[in-house]
């Protein structure tokens, strides 16, 4: 492997090529393909987000490195198939960023971030149509996104063509309507319909979050963190008593939960 500075991307590319070398490479790295690596790529992106959420910049540096390695891994496998290489990836994103920012790299003018978002979406739609991809107003919202994020994006796309509620109150009414339908499905004892109605309820909740300018994924993450903190306080209280969960009734656990909430 060519000796270069560890700050040079060529060093990382060389490491990856060596790991995939058919003779002296790592057996695990050699047997991977795009499909087997994709879950790790997604996991690393979430770990980047987690480091940002915790405002841990040293950890963010490391996690960004892990995510970059995933890009290098995919590019190396593509290079072996003679499809494209890392340089092609860099070239493609550089061209795309210049093309999608004519107000910066050309003569155009964008008045605000909102206008830029609209122009960005128009350019993306034009690119999809030119490439023969789905040209629907909701095209390009990938299936692999977390469901809440995908619901939010689908709602935004639909809203751009006018299919939306006029204000948050209308969405709140829809949430209540969907909750009533969940209750009706439960009373009928139809598991498949219960699942369907809960899905409709979650979709309506994502729309409500969008109308309230709330990121549904972040809101749910915060709720999970709050739940975890409260649960740990209840757990500590149970252990401090020398008690066991199975010996505590629902009323007692509910009281301990309310006490945990007051400690926030």
Image (spheres, rainbow, N blue to C red):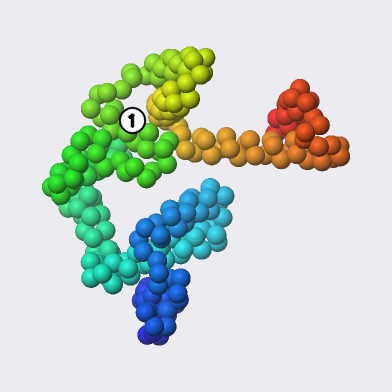
What residue is at 73 percent from the left and 32 percent from the top? 260
Q: Identify which residue is drawn at 35% across, 61% down.
A: 34
Viewport quadrant of the C terminus: top right
Residue 56, image x, y percentages: 56, 55
Q: Nearer the viewer, residue 137 or 122?
A: 137
Q: Is residue 23 above or below residue 189?
A: below
**Residue 164 at least partly seen:** yes
Q: Is residue 18 above or below residue 53?
A: below
Category of crowding for the residue at label 1, using alpha-carbon neighbours closer than 10 angstroms: few (below 14), some (14–19), many (at least 20): many
Q: Secondary structure at mark 1?
A: helix
Q: Quadrant of residue 262?
A: top right
Q: In the image, is residue 117 above or below residue 72?
A: above
Image quarter of the N terminus: bottom left
- Give the residue at mark 1: 155
Is 56 above or below relative to 109? Answer: below
- Relative image position of residue 245 (x, y in whole percent): 77, 35
* Residue 182 appears in view: no
Residue 150 x/y as whole percent: 37, 38
Residue plotted at (52% across, 50% down): 50
In the figure, is residue 162 to the left or right of 22? left
Q: Residue at the spot x=37%, y=79% of the render?
A: 21
- Relative depth, front residue between 23 and 66: 23
So how many labels did they put on this image?
A: 1
View extreme (right): residue: 242
Q: Position of residue 201 (x, y in %)?
A: 44, 24
Q: Quadrant of residue 22?
A: bottom left
């Amino acid at each position: 492997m060519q000796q270069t500075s560890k700050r040079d991307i060529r060093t990382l590319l060389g490491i990856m090529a060596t790991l995939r070398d058919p003779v002296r490479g790592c057996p695990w790295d050699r047997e991977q393909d795009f499909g087997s690596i994709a879950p790790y790529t997604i996991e690393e992106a979430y770990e980047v987000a987690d480091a940002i959420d915790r405002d841990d910049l040293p950890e963010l540096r490391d996690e960004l490195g892990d995510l970059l390695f995933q890009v290098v891994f995919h590019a190396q496998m593509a290079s072996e198939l003679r499809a494209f290489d890392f340089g092609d990836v860099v070239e493609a994103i550089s061209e795309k960023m210049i093309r999608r920012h004519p107000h910066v790299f050309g003569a155009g003018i964008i008045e605000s971030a909102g206008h830029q978002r609209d122009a960005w979406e128009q350019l993306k739609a034009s690119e999809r149509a030119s490439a023969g991809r789905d040209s629907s107003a909701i095209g390009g919202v990938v299936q692999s996104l977390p469901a809440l994020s995908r619901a939010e994006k689908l709602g935004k796309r639909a809203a751009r063509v006018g299919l939306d509620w006029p204000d948050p109150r209308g969405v709140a009414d829809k949430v209540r309507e969907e909750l009533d339908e969940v209750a009706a499905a439960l009373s009928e004892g139809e598991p498949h319909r219960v699942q369907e109605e809960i899905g409709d309820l979650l979709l309506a909740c994502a729309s409500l979050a969008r109308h309230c300018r709330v990121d549904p994924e972040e809101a749910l993450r915060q709720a999970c963190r709050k739940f975890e903190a409260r649960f740990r306080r209840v757990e500590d209280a149970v252990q401090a008593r020398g008690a066991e969960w199975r010996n505590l009734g629902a009323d007692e656990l509910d009281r301990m939960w309310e006490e945990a909430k007051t400690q926030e």
